[in-house]
Structure formats: C-alpha cells, structure tokens
Amino acid sequence: MKKTTFLIIVTITGFALAGVIFIQFYWIRNAILLQEEQLDSQVRLALKGTVNQMYENKSDTCNDGLFCSRNCSLENNQQINGLNINALKKLIRSEFSEVGLRGPYVYGIFSPNVQKVEFVSKVGYDKMLLQTDHFVSLSCIYKNDQMVLGAYFPDERNRALENIFWWLLVCFILLLVLVLGFIFNIYSFLRQKKISEMKSDFVNNITHEFKTPIATISLASEMLLKPSILASESKSLKYAGIIYDENNRLKNQVEHVLQLAQLDRGTYSLKYDKLDIHSLIIKVVESYQLIMKERDGTIKLQLNASNFIIQADIIHIENVITNLLDNANKYSPSSPEITISTFNRNDHIVVAVDDKGIGISAKNQKYIFRKLYRVHTGNLHNVKGFGLGLYYVKRLIEAHNGQVTLHSEPGKGSRFEVSLPLYILKNLTRNPNSYES
C-alpha cells in the first residue's frame, strides 16, 4: 500500500473514530441532564405533596398537627411561624420516601426575593438552600408572605451519575477497546510495513551477495574452457582457485541463511565442550588479519581475564566472535581500529569488541539485535550484509545463558560486550534447548 493511500485511510478512520467518541460523549451528557431533570421532577413532586399535606392538615393540636395556635406550648426551637418542625420533618421524610428519594438532603423554608432563610434542617447550608432549583411556593399557607419550601442535595451530580454508572462503564470500555484497536492496527500495519521493507532489503542484499560470486564462478569456468588456459597449468590453477574460493563464499552465505531458519524454529543443538576462549579469540583474529590488511586496519588484543575457561559450543562461539569482528569492520569507514578485550565480572567472563566506526544512535540501538534489521548508513552504500549477524549473536549467547550489551555513540564508535558464565565442573547451568553433551 502506498504511503499516501495509507495516510488517507488513517485520516478517514481517525475522523470516524473521533466522531463516534464525540457522539458518545454527547449522549452521555444528555443522559446526565435527563437524570438531573428526573431528580428535579421527583423533588418537586415530593415538595408539592408536602405542601398539599400542610394545607389539608391545619390543626391547633401542637403535639400532632403541623400548625400551632397562639397558646402553643412548643418551644421556640420546635416551631417557626407557627409551624411544627417535628411534624414537618416526619412529613418531608414520608413524601420523599414515597417518590424514592434518599438522603442526604437539606430542606427548609426561605424567601427567595429577600434572600432570607426562615428555617433550615441543617446548620451551615443557608447559602446552598437559597441557590437550589428545587422549591415550591407556600403561598397557599402564608398568603401574605412570598415564602417557599425547598430542598438541596449535596451529592446531586453524583446521584445522576450513579443511576447510569454501569452504562457509562460499558460505554467507556467499548470506547477504550475501539481506540486501542485503532492504535494497535496502525502499529501493526507500520510494523508489517517495516518488516516488509527489511525483507525486501534482505532479498536485495542476498541477491547481490549471491550474484557476485556466481558471476565470478561463471567467468572463471568460461576461462577454463578455453584451450589456451587449459594448456597453462598455472592459469588453470589460478581460475580453479577462484572457483573454489567463490564456492566457499557462497557456502558460507547459505550457512548464514540456514542458521537463521534454525534459530527461528528452535531446532538448533549445542555441543558443549570445555573451551579456552582466549585461544579461540587469538585463532579468530589470526584468520581475520587478511581481511584487515585489505583495509589497512588493525586489531588489538587486551586479554586481561584471569579465568577464561568456559563450557560452550566452540563452533557457535567462534561464529559469534567472527560476527562481532565483521560488524566492527563493516561499520568503520576506513582503516578500522578494533580492540578485543576480556575481563572477569562476578562468575562470568566478558568479551568486549570496541571499534572507532560510525557508531549507532540511541534510536537504532533498540532494534539492532532484531532479525534482518540493518542500520541506515546514509550515503555509505558499501556496507554489505543480511542483517542476521547481531541477531545470531544475541540468540546464541542467550542460549549459552549469557548476555549481550551495546554501548555506542554516533561518530565515536561502538562497544559490544558478551558475558558468558565461567566453566564450573559441578551444577553447570545449561540452556533448556536441545543439545548434545
């Protein structure tokens, strides 16, 4: 898929998802407002019922009635303007209970015109009661006064949310699933696109790597078919040697690809032997010197580890060291300066490979050990490879219960450290993968 097409699809899908989220929040807001209106209707219904009861049950009997006569025996704190507070309290509770309203709530009698509270059921709520939207007129009782009976709910917004809590929860969960799914799909697509590009690079690289030796073998074979070349033993040996070398080169490249397949399937086996890693490093460096001479490079050895015996698969460890050397050489623009050092850390030996090459940015360091991943080198196009070397190194070292770490800075070079457990005769910890002993 083209980048423009992908951006258009993501933009349209993003707008659609944003529209769904906006509509959901719009309906949630409306649902909350509807719950608040429903609460207001319930409160007004209860307050009107209270006022109707007050109007229909006027009585001079102070102990049971709502109103008191002038000779009322109630104390001042139990009556307001001739109203029996205890009887009002019982009536309010009864009416609120009938419409399904529960506490906490505050009620009282006040005059909204003059902002004066005659009575409030709970001290300290005078201002809130004056601002409440839930009240009914008491004009049928106090004809000469513009007083109202009102109620205030401290948790009014919470009541509205509680009534639709489970619907809100389900809605938010579904929205979260949609958003996460959208993000995951974009991430998966970008990741697949990147993998596809890496595979394309791999195919291009392997085609180039195979094409060169095949062309060389073809030319050398063609030369050997000429009678003039066959007549000369030295020339025949020369072209036969070229064919042999290029054939080995092809064989090694195929081995790299096969090793990758084995690593992915987990079918590789490790043959553990007692190994002097210092001797192995010296052997690898000696065989690599010819490559370094071609680029006028040097390899320095600082083998300072006092304990350098490990239990490992010799062939794989040799390949690991070779891959690290090859990586240091490829990413050093000219005259490579490589240092291989060893030292002991706890019960491990650490093999460090330092170079003064182009280095690796922090952004690329996260991906450097991934399969087929290759660091972009800008205008430097002579860096060959399949992107398998460091992936192979990490997988094999971890199979040996070791660890690989990278320290690098662009323009200053890189340092790869391979940590392997030292040889212990007893209680040797081995990787759970299949292996031979």
Image (cartoon, rainbow, N blue to C red):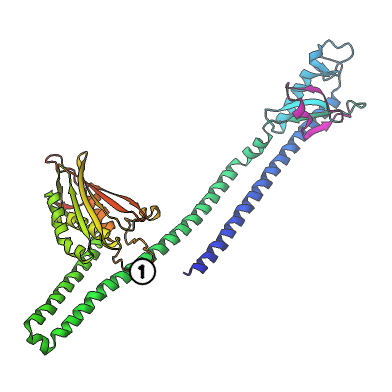
Q: Residue furthest bottom?
A: 227
SS at mark 1?
A: helix
Q: Is residue 140 left or right of residue 90?
A: right
Residue 313 among magenta residues = no
Look at mark 1 in the image and give the residue it sits on. Answer: 200
State whether residue 431 appears in this view: no
State whether residue 375 appears in this view: yes
Position of residue 269 measured from the top left corner of the image (x, y, whole percent): 18, 55
Q: Looking at numbered disc 1 in the image, what kind of residue is underneath it?
A: Ser
Q: Residue at x 35, y 56 (%)?
A: 411
Q: Nearer the viewer, residue 141 or 390?
A: 390
Q: Nearer the viewer, residue 97 or 356?
A: 356
Position of residue 104 measured from the top left corner of the image (x, y, whole percent): 67, 27
Position of residue 268 measured from the top left corner of the image (x, y, whole percent): 20, 57
Q: Is residue 307 left or right of residue 325?
A: left
Q: Is residue 315 left or right of residue 391?
A: left
Q: Nearer the viewer, residue 173 or 137?
A: 173
6 to 266, vertically: above or below = below
Q: Is residue 332 left or right of residue 60?
A: left
The count of marks equals: 1
User: How dense is the environment of label 1, judged by Cα within 10 Å: few (below 14), some, or many (20 and up)?
Assistant: few
Where does the magenta region start and end? 113-140
14 to 67, vertically: above or below = below
Q: Residue at x 26, y 71 (%)?
A: 209
